């Protein structure tokens, strides 16, 4: 295959070829960045919470009778909910659950000294040595109902639960344990949380926070043996995934039977899938839009390549005929157009890769996006090469069908 | 001449239907995508009170101690006002109208046996609220300053809530049990909710929220009703009651009709701050006091999510690629017509005539692309409206956006046609005739 005739034709159509190159370059740059955004959003949306989401549903109830005893009400409610057929277990929490945005959090310090040091330098809420962590409470059986995986230590003992604000032990997530006590065994250590000393009695593998303040510290969680002490609470029910809908209906009825004066907001009766969908709703919208625009861009570029190639084939019918007449095979003609496309697209990709990196740097400064991993670039290049070859295939095949006799006709 | 060029253009486009179709499709996709995003941005940054917004201002004071440091990404306490400051500004009565307000959710126990108790979101406000924002009433009216002073238990319901509680019967004069207290209904507002709900505290979903009831702020403070939104205290050990001078939680809006009034009010805020500083309550410079107009306040709050911003840039990038695509295709198309152009030039057509003829051809593609673009944008907006996002329901194209879409399409295609047309009209006549 000789490049010289191709280069000389392209020189003849310099401006058109340059425009096509520019289009390929822009498409390559945008698609690489968009693909990266899609991938990071998908990673966000599918992040694990550490709980058995597919088997959980929640129902929030708010008591309106001010003289009710919270503990007694919870006991009655829990017993009634447990009796619903299909319910495997049920617990009450006061408000916080992974991804439900009811976050209460504060600095967790690894020791009294660190806490006092942070107090002195008033750096307590700056993260640092005392990472900001979310607090979870709940009735006995929380670990089992949520399906949390205990990797060290033990669950709370019945005697450790308290309705006052004074728990003495805590179970923490492994992410927090690694942050507080790097390279050490967290079990038995005493951490300081809001001035209270809590001994670490267990470590769970993963437990996401109600709100993921930036993905990096989305897993710093503390569970305390603290009983919910108001008549506004969330009941968490565990069941087979397919039973969740009808169990939620039954649960609502059961709760109203126990206390008809309570308020249950219909929006707060939901399966865990709904909680997750609501949390990541903006990201899913964005993923859809990003995919649509990336596909649209690739489509338009393919149209451009095909349209122009089509046009060039028509224009050069006579010269193709002459080349066929003087001995070029069909394969030669086919390869001619394919090589021409390869040249244009390659130059476009080289420019596009540079543009992609520049665009990413720009986005990093304006939208706090992370750096584009370099391996996206060869993949983007491969996609555009394939796209170029695919789009040029049909016009090139048509060109290859031009019979040599065309050369003898006048146009 | 225009008719003749139009004819020529139609003829030429018909001769290459595939290429024409490609160009129309490309411009339609580009325009459709960018207009979808522009429309979303347009409705999100639109004026929530057309006709009235120019007179609405919100004053902001800075009562924070000198050593106060904001904690991480927590809200700015000076976005809201303390009770003593709001009461002082109300009493001074330096604006045409002024009102202090805050949001709250209260338990409502319906009298009807078939309705369970439920929580309902509304606004605690002072008397001028309704006149200040021009709230339309279906029945009755708001309350008076005397009611504020007397902490009268009166309430204004939104039409939706009134209908839910009292059906088609008249609500005015009835009693509503709200937050464990009885309130007499004195008015029912027509369906009214500015989008965004600019006077609300910025936490929350401002594009979908609406107030379902309004009651006097003094009652809410007396009965210690629950308050929605930020309550930022800055003195450790303070009682953090609603009337504390060290906690901001109120929103304050005033009406100022003339530039002179605006300037005078700005000066009044500074004087007030200076006076408070002299009294030892404020520590920071009195010039920290600010007066935002409505649109300025929305810009300050920056309600448009980063995502929408990013989507807009993406859509514009997409449009640009589509335009480059069309430039290339038009260039190829026009240059191929060298023969025809040479003949017309040889017969006496000036370069300008060729340029206009080809420009009309590009514009024609733009019009077709614009029509397709409107259809694609409608489809895009429809898909956005299906999303549960806070702003999604607003995504509707108005007439100005519709015309804008068509104009943008024609502009884009004429711009795209400039270079090819310029190149084509420089074809030397003789050479092409010989070659043809």
Image (spheres, helix red, strand yellow):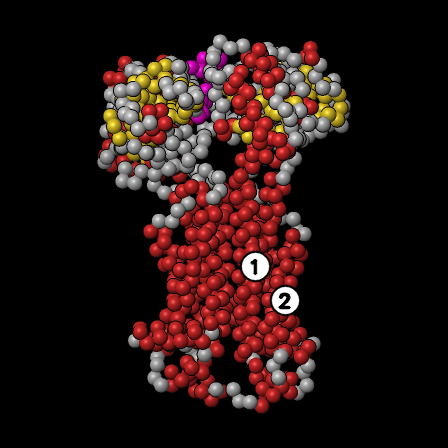
Which span is picked out in magenta?
Answer: B229-243
- Residue for point 50% across, 60% down: B321
Magenta span has A363? no
Measured along the vertical axis of the image, is residue A289 above or below residue A407? above
Please say whether residue B73 is visible from this viewpoint: yes
**Residue hosting label 1:** A298
Among the two numbered marks 1 and 2 on one chain, the one whose residue lies closer to the N terminus: 1
Label 1 chain ID: A
| Residue A225 quadrant | top right
**Cβ atoms under marks 1 and 2 closer than 8 Å:** no
State the mark number for residue B254: none
Across and down, in percent, residue B315 comes to 48, 53
Looking at the picture, tell me which residue is in the foreground, B189 or B406: B189
As drawn, A102 above or below A372? above
Q: Are the residues flagged by discs 1 and 2 from a single subunit?
A: yes
Residue identified by numbered label 2: A389
The percent position of residue B169, horizontal first and vertical second, equals 29, 26
Q: Which secondary structure dominates the residues rendered in magenta?
A: loop
Whole-percent x, y for residue B408 in the image:
39, 58
């Amino acid at each position: 295959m000789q490049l010289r005739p191709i280069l000389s034709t392209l020189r003849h159509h310099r401006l058109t070829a340059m425009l096509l190159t520019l289009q390929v370059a822009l498409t390559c740059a945008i698609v690489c960045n968009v693909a990266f955004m899609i991938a990071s959003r998908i990673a966000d949306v599918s992040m694990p919470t550490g709980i058995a989401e597919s088997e959980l549903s929640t129902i929030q109830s708010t008591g309106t009778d001010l003289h009710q005893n919270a503990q007694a009400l919870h006991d009655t409610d829990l017993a009634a909910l447990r009796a619903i057929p299909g319910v495997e277990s049920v617990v009450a929490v006061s408000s916080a659950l992974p991804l439900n945005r009811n976050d209460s959090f504060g600095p967790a310090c690894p020791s009294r000294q660190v806490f006092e040091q942070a107090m002195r330098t008033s750096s307590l809420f700056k993260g640092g040595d005392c990472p900001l962590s979310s607090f979870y409470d709940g009735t006995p059986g929380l670990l089992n109902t949520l399906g949390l995986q205990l990797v060290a230590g033990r669950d709370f003992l019945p005697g450790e639960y308290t309705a006052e604000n004074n728990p003495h032990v805590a179970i923490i997530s492994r992410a927090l344990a690694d942050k507080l006590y790097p390279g050490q065994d967290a079990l038995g250590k005493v951490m300081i949380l809001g001035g209270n000393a809590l001994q670490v009695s267990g470590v769970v593998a993963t437990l996401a926070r109600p709100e993921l303040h930036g993905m990096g510290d989305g897993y710093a969680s503390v569970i305390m043996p603290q009983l919910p002490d108001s008549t506004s609470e969330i009941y968490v029910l565990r069941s087979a995934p397919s039973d969740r809908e009808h169990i939620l209906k039954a649960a609502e009825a059961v709760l109203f039977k126990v206390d008809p004066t309570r308020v249950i907001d219909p929006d707060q009766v939901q399966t865990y899938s709904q909680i997750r969908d609501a949390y990541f709703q903006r990201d899913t919208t964005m993923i859809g839009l990003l995919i649509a625009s990336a596909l649209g861009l690739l489509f338009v570029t393919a149209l451009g390549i095909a349209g122009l190639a089509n046009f060039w084939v028509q224009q050069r019918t006579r010269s193709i005929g002459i080349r066929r007449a003087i001995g070029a095979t069909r394969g030669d003609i086919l390869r001619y157009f394919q090589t021409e496309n390869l040249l244009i697209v390659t130059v476009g990709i080289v420019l596009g890769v540079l543009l992609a990196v520049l665009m990413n740097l720009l986005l990093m400064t304006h939208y706090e996006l992370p750096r584009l991993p370099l391996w996206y670039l060869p993949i983007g290049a491969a996609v555009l090469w394939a796209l170029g070859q695919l789009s040029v295939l049909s016009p090139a095949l048509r060109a290859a069908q031009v019979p040599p006799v065309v050369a003898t006709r006048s146009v | 001449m225009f008719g003749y060029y139009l004819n020529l253009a139609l003829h030429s486009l018909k001769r290459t239907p595939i290429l024409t179709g490609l160009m129309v499709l490309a411009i339609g996709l580009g325009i459709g995508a960018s207009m979808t995003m522009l429309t979303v941005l347009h409705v999100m940054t639109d004026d929530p009170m057309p006709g009235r917004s120019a007179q609405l201002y919100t004053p902001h004071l800075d009562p924070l101690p000198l050593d106060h440091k904001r904690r991480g990404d927590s809200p700015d306490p000076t976005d809201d006002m303390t009770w003593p400051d709001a009461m002082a500004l109300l009493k001074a009565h330096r604006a045409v109208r002024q009102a202090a307000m805050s949001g709250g959710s209260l338990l409502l126990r319906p009298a009807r046996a078939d309705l369970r108790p439920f929580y309902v979101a509304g606004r605690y406000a002072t008397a001028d609220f309704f006149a200040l924002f021009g709230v339309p009433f279906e029945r009755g009216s708001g309350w008076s300053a005397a009611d504020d002073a007397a902490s009268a238990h009166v309430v204004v319901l939104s039409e939706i809530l009134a209908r839910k509680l009292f059906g088609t019967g008249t609500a005015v004069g009835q009693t509503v049990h709200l937050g464990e207290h009885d309130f007499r209904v004195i008015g029912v507002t027509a369906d009214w909710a500015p989008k965004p709900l600019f006077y609300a505290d910025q936490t929350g979903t401002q594009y979908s929220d609406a107030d379902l009831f309004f009651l006097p702020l003094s009652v809410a403070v007396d009965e210690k009703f629950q308050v929605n939104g930020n309550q930022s205290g800055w003195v450790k050990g303070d009682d953090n009651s609603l009337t504390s001078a060290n906690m901001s939680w109120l929103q304050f809006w005033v009406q100022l009709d003339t530039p002179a009034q605006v300037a005078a009010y700005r000066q009044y805020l500074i004087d007030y701050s200076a006076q408070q500083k002299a009294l030892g309550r404020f520590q920071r410079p009195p010039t920290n006091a600010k007066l935002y107009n409505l649109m300025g306040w929305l810009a300050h709050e920056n309600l448009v999510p980063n995502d929408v911003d990013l989507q807009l840039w993406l859509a514009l990038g997409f449009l640009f690629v589509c335009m480059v695509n069309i430039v290339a295709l038009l260039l190829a198309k026009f240059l191929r017509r060298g023969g025809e152009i040479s003949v017309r030039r040889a017969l006496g057509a000036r370069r300008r005539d060729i340029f206009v003829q080809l420009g009309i051809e590009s514009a024609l593609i733009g019009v077709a692309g614009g029509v397709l673009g409107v259809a694609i944008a409608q489809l895009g907006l429809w898909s956005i409206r299906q999303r549960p996002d806070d702003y999604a329901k607003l995504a509707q194209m108005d007439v100005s956006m519709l015309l804008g879409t068509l104009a943008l399409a024609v502009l884009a295609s004429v711009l795209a046609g400039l270079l090819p047309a310029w190149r084509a009209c420089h074809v030397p006549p003789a050479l092409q005739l010989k070659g043809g």
